[in-house]
Amino acid sequence: MHYKLALIGFGNVARSLARLLVRKQELLKSKYDVTFSFVGISTGRHGCAVNPNGLDIQKALDLAESGQDISSLNDSQFPIANSLDVIQHCGADALFENSPVNTQTGQPALDHIRAALNLGMHAITANKGPVVHGYRELTQLAESKGKKFRFESAVMGGAPVFSVMREAFPLAELESFKGIFNATTNVILSRMESGETYEQALAHAQKIGLAETDPTNDVDGWDAAIKVAALVTVLWDAPITPQEVNPTGIRGITTEMIAQAKADGKRYKLVCFAEKADGKIKVGVTPQLVDAASPLYGMMDSSTGITFRTDVILDYSISVSEKPGMAGGPVETAYGLFADFANIVKE
Amino acid sequence: MHYKLALIGFGNVARSLARLLVRKQELLKSKYDVTFSFVGISTGRHGCAVNPNGLDIQKALDLAESGQDISSLNDSQFPIANSLDVIQHCGADALFENSPVNTQTGQPALDHIRAALNLGMHAITANKGPVVHGYRELTQLAESKGKKFRFESAVMGGAPVFSVMREAFPLAELESFKGIFNATTNVILSRMESGETYEQALAHAQKIGLAETDPTNDVDGWDAAIKVAALVTVLWDAPITPQEVNPTGIRGITTEMIAQAKADGKRYKLVCFAEKADGKIKVGVTPQLVDAASPLYGMMDSSTGITFRTDVILDYSISVSEKPGMAGGPVETAYGLFADFANIVKE
């Protein structure tokens, strides 16, 4: 089986994905008898290209990485001006959506995925926006077309979480989860424990490319809240918004509080949690003191993790630690997208 | 689809499984459109029963739990004297093998599973023996019959490990794993850190039903070694024996060594590991000092866990903690068997 692929968004993650697909090309062929080609690429500022006969992906990577426009690779009989044009005219079998994240609306990813599913493509994204704002609609749309909507990388940057609950916990009832989902705040709290001020620790997180220039989204807990919302929305099929999670960030945690916690053998962590009891779901993101008995205690720096409690296995924890500053980096996120694709094509 | 089930071995785990299947009956029907009946049961000391029209499972549970023979439930036209007779004449579609473990030979489980697969049944076990002694043969036999051989519960007592690597890490290359696989030794080391002697800690592990009267298998590392062998055999398709793992147990760890480690902020753990490099596999089970930076440091008491390193996600850790003394208890192990069944029937 041959799959034609479209890449909407061609930043670090999408380019890592393209390289990973090329690197795993032989394995896809030998294990699943699957081949692929790229038929459409849409970049943020360097144009679009469609070629139903297959684009030269190495050339596209070279152009994008040297800051050049990729439109020279375009070979479509239709005018191709934007992402929706690419989706409409590339004839892909699967779409990877990596356009910029808007967690308030889920756009433009939501429209891209909707268009792709309507055209009979599988849709795969690392973007939390369309999960929180469109999970049920997009899943139903995908099912009605016999296709899949997948988003493994939306939480814990590519480390398997959704697929573990889906594939490895069949017919289990999820009762609660608790975790650390935001690497930036975890790096800041870890470094404050080593004596840095909040400002120094934040500056470090920005220097290693983890925190944005405006760190609000991370330090006020919104990134964590949208991940909680995504997990609750998917795992319990219960749509909630980040606003309903109503997060408390880490700005109120002082060096004195951290020093006192350390003296008591404890640590502050930005804890994300959700619990279902009597049909009601309680959720939150809030700094909490944890001691060495908690699986969260050992998660330092950019490590993230989650503990699931189900009716069948009490506390099952997943954690991921990467090279310092690299958790949820482009390669890991790209693997989550790749794994979604591999799991779709092997079925 | 209706599945006829056979239970070979009817101890704690098998009886927990029977209860779990009954409890999840409605879900199996509503989610997968699957129904089931029990057509054969073989116990260790309380007889066997076959009824192709379905056994009364509640009656079988009551009889076995009050120490009575279950042969009164037998309604077969053939003489049923042992497990192989049950397998031969029950007409099951899936067999759960829970006979006593023999890690030296894998018998009698190996023969039971072979017979079941040859008769066109799926075969599911929690038993490490047939995995280490027959993985490749049984997998090939299953494939030739269009059936599955599954064993999620063989390592980490029912907590998903094999299915995670199989389903959630498609086309990833496993480079190494490291973990704590034996709950008994972890309980002993944890309690010695709190000031108990080895003898006191062992007596506690025996009292809570975790350690055997003869603790050799646990404390000398053989249980851990066979789990390492099972993982290596399956995950790299590279059969090795527990003897090749050549474990070192915890008998050499003194209270003084543990006190010194504690003073240094470290802990002894019975570390299991395997690493593949240049086509060669290095394996071991040995007590090691770990510090707070290790994911193994926080695994206390009966918690167990594993860290996988792959070419795509650096360090992905799974750990499971249960009620004190309950990790890998019959309910969790039963869920692993149930999950294997659920994953087979949903495909």
Image: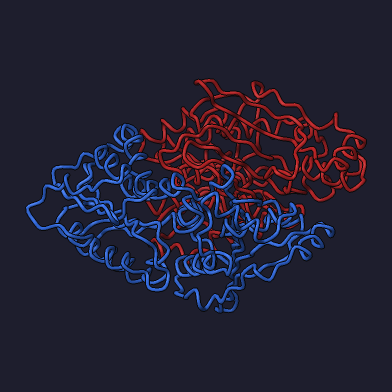
Chain colours: A red, B blue
Q: Position of residue B152 (x, y in %)?
A: 43, 55
Which residue is outermost to the left?
B77
Question: Relative to the observer, which residue lies in front, A115 or B186?
Answer: B186
Residue at image position (78%, 30%) is: A249
Q: x and y percent of residue A128 in the render?
A: 60, 36
- Which residue sits at x=39%, y=48%? B12
Along the horizontal axis of the image, is B79 left or right of A212? left
In the image, residue A157 above or below residue A290: below
Is residue A244 visible from the viewing direction of this image?
A: yes
Instruction: Identify which residue, B159 or A66, lies in the foreground.
Output: B159
Residue B163 position, x and y percent, is 45, 53
In the shown orientation, is residue A333 left or right of residue B114? right
Residue A1 appears in view: no
Classify residue A281 as left or right of residue A137.
Answer: right
Is residue A304 toward the left or the right of residue B28 in the image?
A: right
Identify the image quadrant of residue B154: bottom left
In this rendering, the answer to whether B83 lies above or below B63 is below
- Figure label count: 0
Screen quadrant of the N terminus of chain A:
bottom left
**Could you say where residue A163 lies in the image, as x and y percent from the top left?**
49, 45
Q: Quadrant of residue B282?
A: bottom right
Q: Residue at x 51, y 55 (%)?
A: B156
B40, A178: nearer the viewer: B40
Who is closer to the viewer here, B104 or A49?
Answer: B104
